[in-house]
Image (cartoon, grey):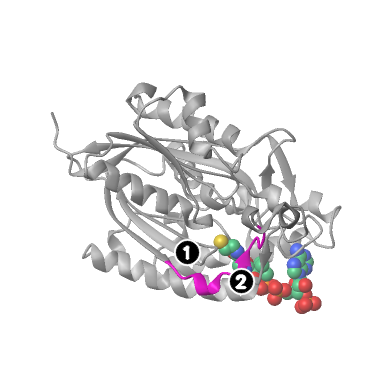
Amino acid sequence: MCSVKYSRIKGTGSYLPEKVLSNTDLEKMIDTTDQWIRDRTGIERRHIVGEDETTCDLAEMASRRAIEAAGINIEDIDLVIIATTTPDRIFPSTACLLQERLGIQKGAAFDVQAVCTGFVYALDIADKFIRTKSARTALVVGADALSRILDWSDRTTCVLFGDGAGAVVLSGSDESGVLSTHLHADGRYKDLLTVPAGISQGYEQVQSQNAFIHMDGREVFKKAVNTLGQLVDETLEANQMEKGDIDWLIPHQANIRIITATAKKLKMPMDRVVVTVQEHGNTSAASIPLALDVAVRDGRVKRGETLLLEAFGGGFTWGSALVKY
Ligand code: COA
């Protein structure tokens, strides 16, 4: 039997809803242009959930693909974590709903809410469960349907986001896997990027115009660029690594300009950065596992390579993971 020194990614999967909304489609809905959206964000299109489609539907598809890629039996999974900001129900958690769909009845299942940083938070937690032998095989999912919390008449936000899910299966191993994780939060920035309504404020709030994403784009942009630069330094220092030791940067896909700034800080050429923002928009907690799965399946990311995952989002929250794939 192997000793458990690390948690290791055994397989990845992702899923995007069928419906595609292009920038040109948006031109017909609001006062915007394809050019403006491309220039400011890099986004060309995004996927949007169907009328009856939910976060759990996306999570289930991504999970089944990750389980297949990992070559494990579903019964081996003894931890299910979903990072999401758009759960299907107030309760039970979307992780419990997913667990039921997959026919898993053992171990813990819970949601993590750290908005766009959610997947990195979930990965950190699952890694700790595995290394402390509290779980053997974890299903870690990032899934969101942010289109449900967008004000489709607000051109400053609705052009930025999309829906999707990504998943990884994580197992204990004596081979290198997750090398380190670094999580942060600072709630003083709660109002710069928020949906300022919630169930404890009463149902009226949830049904009001407040129940949509409100964002100070310029301030979020500035803070994200500075913070991610510091996060990259922190991650390299903790692992006594140099910039050149990273094979792939797999960033949260919010805006191509934020991604380029982080790559520049790392002195990484853009062909070592996985970029999906043009196809997916900002899919919140789904964005990193989605990008990872795309790059694994198209053969860019290979076993043994060193990946730097990093994210920034509402809270503010931010975090990174250095992973030997
Ligand atoms: N189409 C056309 N014009 C738009 C527009 C749209 N969709 N949205 C805003 N504009 C206009 C603004 O009204 C403004 O017009 P004005 O100069 O007449 O007032 C102008 O474009 C510039 O707006 P500004 O907000 O300064 O643009 P920007 O360069 O900061 O880009 C964002 C806006 C949102 C793309 C950018 O700030 C950003 O990416 N921020 C980070 C957002 C993010 O990633 N959030 C999630 C983090 S997880």
What kind of residue is marked 2? Leu
Q: Quadrant of the C terminus?
A: top left
Whether residue 198 is visible to the viewer of this picture, yes or no, is yes
Compared with 75, 66 (above or below) is below
Q: Which mark is residue 317?
A: 1
Q: Identify the secondary structure beneath mark 1.
A: strand
In this image, 102 relative to 245: left or right?
right
What is the span of residues highlighted in magenta in the rendered image? 185-197
| Residue 241: % across, % down | 24, 64
Picture coordinates of residue 91, whole percent (x, y) = 56, 40
Q: Look at the numbered disc 2 and say if its residue's Cβ is closer than 8 Å to ligand 1.
A: no
Position of the N terminus by quadrant? top left
Q: Residues within 10 Å of mark 1 (few under 14, many from 20)?
A: many
Circle 2 crowding by C-alpha within 10 Å: few under 14, some 14–19, many from 20:
some
Name the residue located 30 percent from the left edge and 63 percent from the top edge. Answer: 244
Would you name the residue on which mark 2 appears?
A: 192
The vertical placement of 39 against 48, above or below, is below
The number of callouts visible is: 2
Residue toward you, 257 or 92 = 92
Q: In what quadrant does ligand 1 lie? A: bottom right
Instruction: Residue 120: say if magenta.
Output: no
Q: Against 38, is 222 above or below?
A: below
Q: CA distance from mark 1 to mark 2?
A: 12 Å
Q: Is residue 52 left or right of residue 223?
A: right
| Residue 247 image point, x, y percent | 34, 54
